[in-house]
């Protein structure tokens, strides 16, 4: 949902900081006060076209930023993560337009293209009442909405997955038919690679053992000499330290009975003698295990050279050779499978059959959902000053199967009785389009993909009972989604959870718009103004209070 909107030097707005709440918010005010400017600003920050005319007169640039709450696991969260634009539970979008008409866009502080900003905006807000930023006029959005309404998301996802598998097998067959020589060359190269790396039998563990053993054999003479030197110095040489130490211990043991102070020295020397004796045993055992085997050393060096040569050839490391082998074996198995043209055709046909079965299941589900959705939206339209109008979801068979199924989905509407249903994008009246959008959103609100809805012109050409119905529907929709509506009708405004007043002020020959969040008393005055026109009476205020006190 939309948390905040900040506007700087945009048209007649100087500075404006707005904080939004959940539920249904009505924006009211005199004609020309600038209510639509808020919608224009929101559309601009979501990627609509802009030029220098939007910059406030005398300012260097206009700047608009909006912060949105991002639900973990949502489509927007995945979109942001895939493009390394993720924030901490939020999406901050910003648009700057300078006085020369140049534009810059940012998402969570990172610069993005206008196309990326527009793509992000499709996950964030639907603006109903104008074509530029309304998802319901886009074929992909209509398809996703129908699939969501019919509970077909998993079936549609599986259909797309099977289509891609089918195309992959088709491409493999085509590639084989047009490039069999290249495939044969690659297969031969891989066979040599697999044979060579398998022959090395190099695993991370065996490699470490090989390096350690080579190190021992390469320095065997020095190790043997060092061990013998240790034995000579400690025990076996003419001036060995252990016999001399034992002699000192023996001599002092004969004297300790005359002076007990020598016991302290013996307590140090005797353990030292035991430690040196243990070291002598260990050195002797180590020396016996040492073997200066020139032939074994040559064999180890040859194996080391073979491993290093293979690593240079394949640009890898000894530790990574098993992964290289696994990858080469997998690719070789794939090529061997694609080496048989009959097998390729069979795999392609099996993939096509699997796709068609799933796509036909999807088509059947879409047919049922389309019929139900058409009836429900048509029924809702009758209460929205579109009596006699009809809504239908048309499923038209595609000339070729596609990733999203076997049919094109198109929302069509006839606003009045006797008219032929036309694509929703061709509905001429902004008010009719906005009310139709309200009807569709009311019916499909539980599966809505976009969390924030903005309605402009929804009250165009209506009043009385229909206006009250529109207000109730917006109120109901606000329980599921964040809803904002620009309205001139007191019946609609009185249904809102929150109400903002947009007013125009003049100071120093400059015109500015300001927005005020109304409390309960101010709402009575504003609803009374909308009811009574120029002169507001106590009766009008009482009527306004009664409207605000209605149970919706």
Image (cartoon, rainbow, N blue to C red):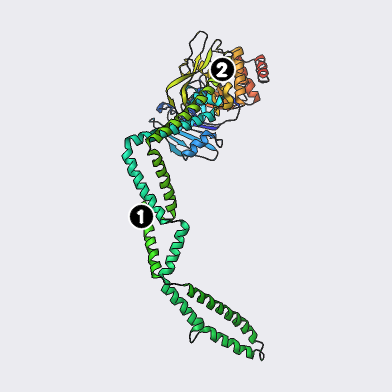
**Image x and y of residue 270, in percent:** 60, 82
Q: Mark 1 points at which residue?
A: 312
- Residue at horizontal 55%, vertical 21%? 369
**Image x and y of residue 102, in percent:** 39, 32
User: Which residue is the extreme one toward the left?
Assistant: 181
> Which is more toward the observer, 262 or 17?
262
Q: Mark 2 points at which residue?
A: 377
Q: Is residue 205 above or below residue 75?
A: below
Q: In which quarter of the image is the C terminus?
A: top right
**Image x and y of residue 353, in percent:** 46, 29
Q: Is residue 6 above or below residue 281?
A: above
For the residues labelled 1 and 2, the Cα–Cα distance comes to: 68 Å
- Residue at horizontal 63%, vertical 26%? 519
Residue at disc 2, secondary structure:
helix
Residue at disc 1, secondary structure:
helix
Q: In this view, does 19 lie above or below 380?
A: below
Residue 8 appears in the figure: no
Residue 451: image quadrant is top right
- Residue at horizontal 53%, vertical 78%? 280
- 1 or 2: tag closer to the N-terminus: 1
- Residue at horizontal 37%, vertical 66%? 298
């Amino acid at each position: 949902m939309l948390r905040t909107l900040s506007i700087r030097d945009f048209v007649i707005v100087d500075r404006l900081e707005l904080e939004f709440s959940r539920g249904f918010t009505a924006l009211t005010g005199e004609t020309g006060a600038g209510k639509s400017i808020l919608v224009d600003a929101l559309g601009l920050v979501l990627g609509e076209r802009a030029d220098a005319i939007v910059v406030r007169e005398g300012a260097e640039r206009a700047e608009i930023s909006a912060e949105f709450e991002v639900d973990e696991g949502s489509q927007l969260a995945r979109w942001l993560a895939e493009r390394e634009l993720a924030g901490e539970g939020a999406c901050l979008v910003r648009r700057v337009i300078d006085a020369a008409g140049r534009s810059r866009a940012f998402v969570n502080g990172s610069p993005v293209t206008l196309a990326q900003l527009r793509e992000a905006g499709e996950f964030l807000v639907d603006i109903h009442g104008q074509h530029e930023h309304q998802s319901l006029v886009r074929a992909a959005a209509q398809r996703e909405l129908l699939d969501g309404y019919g509970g077909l998301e998993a079936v549609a996802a599986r259909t797309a997955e099977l289509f891609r598998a089918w195309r992959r097998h088709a491409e493999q067959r085509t590639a084989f038919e047009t490039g069999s020589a290249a495939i044969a060359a690659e297969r031969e190269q891989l066979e040599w690679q697999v044979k060579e790396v398998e022959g090395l039998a190099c695993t991370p563990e065996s490699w470490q053992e090989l390096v350690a053993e080579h190190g021992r054999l390469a320095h065997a003479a020095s190790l043997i000499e060092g061990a013998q030197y240790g034995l000579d110095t400690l025990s076996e040489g003419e001036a060995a330290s252990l016999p001399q130490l034992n002699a000192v211990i023996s001599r002092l043991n004969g004297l300790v009975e005359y002076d007990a102070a020598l016991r302290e020295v013996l307590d140090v020397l005797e353990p030292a003698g035991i430690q040196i004796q243990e070291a002598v045993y260990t050195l002797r055992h180590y020396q016996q295990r040492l073997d200066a085997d020139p032939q074994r050393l040559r064999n180890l060096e040859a194996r080391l050279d073979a491993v290093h040569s293979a690593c240079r050839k394949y640009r890898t490391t000894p530790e990574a050779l098993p992964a290289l082998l696994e990858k080469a074996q997998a690719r070789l198995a794939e090529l061997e499978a694609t080496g048989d043209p009959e097998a390729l055709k069979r795999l392609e046909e099996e993939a096509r059959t699997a796709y068609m079965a799933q796509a036909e299941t999807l088509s059947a589900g879409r047919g049922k959902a389309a019929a139900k959705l058409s009836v429900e939206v048509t029924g809702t339209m009758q209460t929205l000053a579109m009596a006699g109008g009809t809504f239908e979801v048309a499923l038209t068979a595609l000339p070729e199967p596609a990733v999203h199924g076997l049919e094109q989905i198109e929302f069509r509407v006839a606003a009045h009785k006797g008219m032929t249903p036309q694509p929703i994008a061709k509905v001429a009246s902004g008010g009719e389009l906005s009310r139709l959008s309200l009807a569709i959103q009311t019916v499909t609100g539980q599966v809505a993909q976009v969390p924030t809805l903005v309605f402009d012109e929804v009250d165009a050409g209506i009043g009385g009972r229909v206006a009250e119905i529109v207000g109730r529907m917006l109120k109901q929709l606000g329980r599921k989604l964040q809803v904002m509506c620009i309205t001139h009708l007191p019946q609609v405004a009185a249904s809102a959870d929150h109400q903002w007043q947009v007013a125009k002020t003049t100071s120093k020959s400059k015109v500015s718009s300001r927005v005020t969040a109304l409390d309960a008393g101010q709402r009575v005055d504003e609803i009374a103004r909308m009811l009574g026109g120029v002169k507001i009476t106590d009766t009008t205020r009482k009527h306004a209070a009664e409207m605000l006190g209605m149970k919706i």
